[in-house]
């Protein structure tokens, strides 16, 4: 039953649209006919004012008469039941909505850009405050130091400075001993077995965190996986392999009767390489072309230092290695 009223409403709406369309077509036709008559009867319209004052006055008078004749005429309005006003309102609303959506997208982009700028400016402001605080602290410390020095004789000031430098050196020496101890413990407890595994064809340092001593004895296959041990490897063959890859046990450690296996050989190589790199860097005094160590071979220790961004190869000679001088920019 509900479909019958809906069908009637649809038919009535279609009829109103049809009447409105015919009315608009009739109005357009009337305007076109009137325009044709004007073009046929009248002279071409002079868009610019004439230079002759009399003709210009007549032009103004004609324009005035035309406006006075058209003013009382009521403008065209659609029929009372015409859907044209609703359609025009719908078109205007749709256009306004589309413009509002476009403006909203632009506003969101502008807001995001402004928020990013605000975050950057906030971070810069915080950095500026930290720098200001550090400068104020430093300035205050320098003033206090200057006042103390002014109150003391020059000889006493020199003694205090020497004492301060000695204290700093002692503190740095203690820190160096602590760092060297931690470095050696890291090599012995973690790094040595992984370096040895990489030298024997195993995984790269860091890929396999737990390497068993039996894996080092058995070796690794071409895919980097540990071989299955079918029997205890002969000690003579094992020592020959260690001597070929690394080198023979140093005389000092041999006299101390310390064990010499794959892990200890890799640890010794790592310590010696880092010591040479440090010594050469100090001797080079921060020079860009100095501090290089000549490598007998490209060892796992050298590759590990390069991967760790601690050392770098010479750009034209991969047999030369040097430490990266992190402090040279600050010193210069």
Image (cartoon, rainbow, N blue to C red):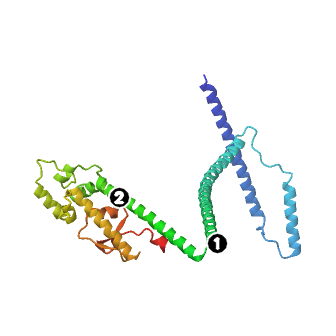
Percent x, y of residue 109: 60, 54
328 lies above or below 199 = below
Percent x, y of residue 205: 29, 56
Q: Quadrant of residue 244?
A: bottom left
Residue 239 appears in view: yes
Residue 201 appears in view: no
Q: CA distance from mark 2 to mark 1?
A: 43 Å
Task: Please give the residue where the numbered disc 1 appears in the rendered image.
Answer: 151
Q: Nearer the viewer, residue 53 or 133?
A: 133
Q: Nearer the viewer, residue 130 or 263?
A: 263
Q: Nearer the viewer, residue 99 or 248?
A: 248
Percent x, y of residue 83: 70, 40
Residue at x 59% of width, y 58% of height? 123
18 lies above or below 74 = above
Circle 2: element type: helix
Identity of the residue furthest to the top in this view: 1
Percent x, y of residue 96: 67, 49
User: Is the residue marked by circle 2 packed among few (<14), some (14-19), or many (20+) residues within 10 Å?
Assistant: few
Task: Please give the residue where the numbered disc 2 appears in the rendered image.
Answer: 181
Report the side of 311 relative to 246 (left or right).
Answer: right
222 lies above or below 155 = above
Q: Quadrant of residue 249?
A: bottom left
Report the side of 47 relative to 14 (left or right).
Answer: right
Question: Which quarter of the rendered picture does the N terminus lie within?
Answer: top right
The answer to whether the residues at label 2 and label 1 have Cβ atoms under 8 Å apart is no
């Amino acid at each position: 039953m509900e479909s019958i009223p809906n069908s009637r409403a649809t038919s009535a709406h279609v009829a109103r649209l049809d009447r409105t369309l015919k009315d608009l077509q009739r109005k357009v036709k009337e305007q076109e006919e009137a325009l044709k008559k004007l073009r046929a009867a009248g002279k071409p319209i002079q868009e610019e004012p004439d230079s002759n004052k009399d003709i210009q006055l007549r032009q103004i008078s004609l324009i005035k008469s035309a406006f006075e004749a058209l003013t009382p005429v009521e403008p065209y309005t659609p029929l009372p039941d015409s859907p044209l006003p609703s359609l025009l309102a719908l078109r205007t609303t749709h256009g306004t909505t589309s413009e509002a959506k476009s403006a909203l997208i632009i506003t969101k982009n502008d807001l995001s850009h402004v928020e990013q700028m605000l975050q950057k400016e906030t971070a810069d402001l915080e950095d500026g405050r930290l720098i200001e605080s550090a400068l104020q602290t430093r300035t205050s410390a320098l003033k206090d130091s200057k006042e103390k020095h002014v109150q003391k004789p020059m000889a006493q000031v020199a003694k205090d400075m020497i004492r301060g430098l000695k204290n700093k050196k002692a503190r740095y020496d203690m820190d160096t001993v602590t760092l060297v101890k931690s470095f050696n413990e890291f090599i012995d407890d973690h790094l040595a077995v992984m370096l040895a595994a990489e030298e024997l064809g195993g995984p790269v340092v860091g890929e396999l965190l737990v390497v068993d001593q039996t894996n080092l004895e058995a070796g690794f296959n071409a895919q980097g996986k540990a071989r299955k041990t079918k029997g205890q490897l002969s000690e003579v063959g094992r020592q020959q392999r260690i001597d070929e890859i690394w080198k023979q046990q140093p005389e000092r450690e041999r006299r101390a009767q310390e064990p010499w296996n794959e892990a200890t050989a890799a640890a010794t190589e790592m310590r010696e390489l880092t010591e040479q790199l440090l010594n050469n860097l100090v001797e080079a005094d921060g020079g860009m072309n100095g501090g290089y160590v000549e490598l007998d071979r490209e060892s796992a220790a050298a590759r590990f230092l390069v991967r760790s961004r601690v050392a770098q190869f010479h750009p034209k000679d991969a047999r030369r290695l040097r430490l990266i001088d992190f402090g040279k920019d600050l010193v210069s």
